[in-house]
Amino acid sequence: MERPQFPEPDPDETGPYTHLGFAVAKPGHEDEVEALILALVEPLRAEEGAIEFHVHRDRADRRTFVIYEMFRSKKDLERHVAQPYTQDFIRSMQPHVEGPLRQQFLRMVSTLPTAAG
C-alpha cells in the first residue's frame, strides 16, 4: 500500500479533514485484518489533532473493512500517516488484503457537535 495523495482543503473550508479507507481481506485473513486495524484505535485516538477514528465491517461482505478517521487538519492526518506505528500497520496489512487500500477524502458540510459539558 502506498501513501495516499492528500487533496488540499478548499480555500473556504474550516471543518475537519476526513478520510475513509477501504480494505478487502483475502479469504481466510479476515481475523488478521480486523486485529491489525483494531490495534490502531488506541494510539490513533491519542494523537494530537485526531477527532474521530472508527472501524467498520460491511454487513453484506464481511471481508470488507471501512476505516473512518477525522483529523483537525490535513497536516494532522499527514503527521499520523508518517508515524512509525502507522507505517508498520501499512506493511503488516499487505499480505492480508486484496490490492491497495482504497482512499476517499471528504469535506464536512455539517458542523461538528459541541462536546457535552
Image (spheres, rainbow, N blue to C red):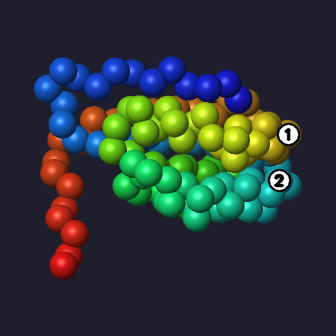
Residue 30 visible somewhere in the drawing: no
Per the image, the residue denoted by label 2 is 29
Q: Relative to residue 76, is residue 37 drawn left or right? A: right
Image quarter of the C terminus: bottom left
Query: SS for tag 2?
Result: loop
Q: Residue 98, percent across and down?
A: 75, 36
Instruction: Give me the disc on residue 63.
Output: none
Image point 19% across, 31% down: which residue? 13
Q: Relative to residue 6, is residue 88 drawn left or right? A: right
Residue 68 visible somewhere in the drawing: yes
Q: Residue 83, percent across and down?
A: 63, 41
Quarter of the view holding residue 23: top right
Of badges 1 and 2, nearer the viewer stands 1
Indicate the amino acid at tag 1. Answer: Pro
Compared to residue 10, the image places residue 90 above or below, namely: below
Indicate the amino acid at tag 2. Answer: His
Q: Relative to residue 69, is residue 9 drawn left or right? A: left
Q: Are marks 1 and 2 in contact (CB under 8 Å)?
A: yes
Image point 34% across, 37% down: which residue? 73
Query: SS for tag 1?
Result: helix
Compared to residue 90, the image places residue 42 above or below, namely: below
Per the image, the residue denoted by label 1 is 95
Chain-order first, disc 1 or disc 2: 2
Label 1 packing within 10 angstroms: few (<14), some (14-19), many (20+): few
Asked whether 28 or 101 is in front, the reply is 101
Image quarter of the N terminus: top right
Image point 58% across, 64% down: which residue? 42
Q: Residue 81, percent across and down?
A: 58, 36
